[in-house]
Image (cartoon, rainbow, N blue to C red):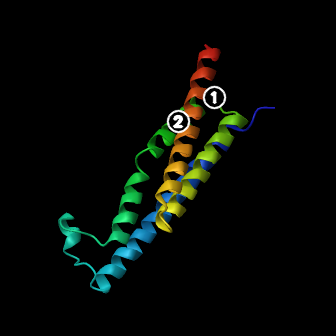
C-alpha cells in the first residue's frame, strides 16, 4: 500500500519549526546582550564590528539553516509534485530533519566541532540519498 502523499510534507513543518526556534533563541540572546551592554544596539544597524562569540555562533547557525536545507525543501516539493512519495523517502526526510535538530543542539550547546561536522555531513549524505532516490524513481517512471 502506498503512503499518503502528504506524509512527505510533515518533515518540512518540523524544519520550519527548527528555524523559528533558532530565530527566537537568537532574538532573546541579542536583546539580552544589548540590555546587558555586551554590545551596542547600533551594531545591528549595519552589522559592523564584532559580536560576542555566543551571538556569532547563533547568528551563523541561523544563516546555515538557509543553506543546505534549501535543497531539502526543493527535494520534498519535487517528490510531492512528481508523485514519487514512498515510505523510504519519508524516512529519509525525517532522518534529515532529525540530524538537523541534532546539529543545532550540538552547535548551540557544547559546539564540539568534531561531532558537529560528523552530524552535518551525515545530514548531507541523507539529503544526497533522497535526491538520488528521486532521480532513479523518475528515470524508472520514464
CA gap, disc 1 and disc 2: 12 Å
Q: Residue at x 39, y 75 (%)?
A: 29
Residue 6 visible to the viewer: no
User: Residue 104: x and y, percent?
Assistant: 51, 60
Q: Residue at x 19, y 74 (%)?
A: 42
Q: Is residue 52 left or right of residue 102?
A: left
Quarter of image, res 90: top right
The numbered disc on residue 75 is 2
Give neighbour class at mark 2: few <14, some 14-19, many 20+ (Cα, 10 Å): some
Give neighbour class at mark 1: few <14, some 14-19, many 20+ (Cα, 10 Å): few
Do the numbered discs 1 and 2 sit on residues whose CB atoms are within 8 Å? no
For the residue pair 117 and 79, the one nearer the viewer reads as: 117
Residue labelled with disc 1: 83
User: Residue 101: x and y, percent?
Assistant: 56, 57
Quarter of image, res 17: bottom right
Q: Is residue 59 left or right of residue 112?
A: left
User: Residue 100: x and y, percent?
Assistant: 54, 53
Above/below status of 28 relative to 85:
below
Q: Is residue 21 left or right of residue 62?
A: right
Residue depth check, mark 1 versus mark 2: number of the one nearer the observer: 2
Counting residues from the start of the chain, the first of labels 1 and 2 encountered is 2
Q: Residue farthest to the bottom?
A: 36
Quadrant for the C terminus, please: top right
Q: Is residue 36 left or right of residue 97?
A: left
Quadrant for the N terminus, please: top right
Residue 32 visible to the viewer: yes
User: Residue 46: x and y, percent?
Assistant: 18, 64
Q: Secondary structure at mark 2?
A: helix
Q: Residue farthest to the right?
A: 1
Q: Residue farthest to the top?
A: 142
Above/below status of 73 relative to 56:
above
Amino acid at each position: 500500500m502506498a503512503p499518503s502523499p502528504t506524509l512527505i510534507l510533515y518533515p518540512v513543518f518540523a524544519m520550519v519549526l527548527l528555524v523559528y526556534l533558532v530565530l527566537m533563541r537568537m532574538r532573546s540572546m541579542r536583546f539580552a546582550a544589548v540590555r546587558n551592554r555586551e554590545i551596542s544596539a547600533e551594531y545591528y544597524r549595519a552589522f559592523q564590528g564584532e559580536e560576542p562569540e555566543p551571538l556569532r555562533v547563533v547568528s551563523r547557525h541561523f544563516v546555515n539553516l538557509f543553506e543546505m536545507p534549501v535543497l531539502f525543501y526543493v527535494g520534498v516539493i519535487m517528490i510531492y509534485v512528481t508523485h514519487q512519495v514512498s515510505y523510504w523517502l519519508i524516512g529519509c526526510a525525517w532522518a534529515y530533519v532529525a540530524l538537523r535538530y541534532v546539529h543545532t543542539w550540538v552547535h548551540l550547546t557544547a559546539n564540539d566541532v568534531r561531532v558537529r561536522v560528523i552530524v552535518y555531513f551525515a545530514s548531507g549524505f541523507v539529503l544526497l540519498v533522497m535526491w538520488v532516490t528521486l532521480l532513479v524513481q523518475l528515470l524508472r517512471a520514464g
